[in-house]
Amino acid sequence: MEEMGYFNEKEYIEGFNLGYKISKEVPELGELIYSAKGVSNKLEGLKDGRQQYLEDQLVDQKNKEKFNDKSKSFLISDQKNKIPRIAKNKSQEIDPEI
């Protein structure tokens, strides 16, 4: 049926999910599958599943970098707003206004 141009959604979805899982657990095998020649709904799903996994990894990496940047800037701004320490000896103390 595939030779005649029919699309089998069930096979494609099975391949997609399997391609995603393989790429996550055994990246080298995902690369081999991606370079495989042939035409089938399952193979296209495998390739697309691998591609989706790689795209998700890029998004995750960018989100981690943004989080790290924000947490660093939070720490820097927090240090700027610190409450002054109380002096250790009386000569450095500030007289309270009465």
Image (spheres, rainbow, N blue to C red):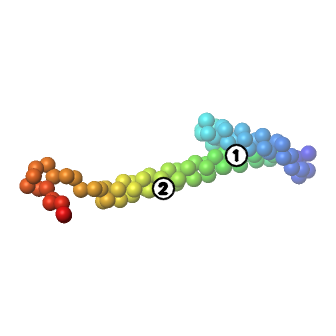
Question: In the image, what residue occupies the spot 24% across and 56% down?
Answer: 84
Measure how far apart labels 2 and 1 are at the Cα level. 26 Å
In the rendered image, the quadrant that contains the N terminus is top right
Tally the numbered discs: 2
Question: Residue 5, how many percent across, how many down?
Answer: 88, 52
Q: Nearer the viewer, mark 2 or mark 1?
A: 2
Q: Position of residue 12 (x, y in %)?
A: 80, 45
Label 1: state its secondary structure. Answer: helix
Q: Amino acid at mark 1?
A: Gly
Marker disc for residue 66: 2
Q: Quadrant of residue 40?
A: top right
Residue furthest left in the image: 91
* Label 1 Cα neighbours within 10 Å, binned few <14 / some 14-19 / many ≥20: many
Q: Residue 87: horizontal and vertical position, in percent?
A: 15, 52
Q: Nearer the viewer, residue 50 or 2?
A: 50
15 on left or right of 63 = right
**In the image, is residue 76 above or below residue 36?**
below
Residue 75, image x, y percentages: 36, 54
Secondary structure, mark 2, is helix
Give whichever of discs 2 and 1 has the lower sequence position.
Answer: 1
Which residue corresponds to the image point at 10% horizontal and 50% vertical from the top-left? 89
Does residue 76 appear in this view?
Answer: no
Q: Nearer the viewer, residue 35 or 96?
A: 96
User: Is 87 or 96 nearer to us in this picture?
Assistant: 96
User: Which residue shows up at 76% across the image and 47% down it?
Assistant: 44
Residue 76, placed above or below residue 46: below
Q: Where is mark 1, residue-wise? A: 49
Residue lying farthest top? 25
Q: Quadrant of the C terminus?
A: bottom left
For badge 2, the amino acid type reads Lys
Q: Residues within 10 Å of mark 2 (few under 14, many from 20)?
A: few
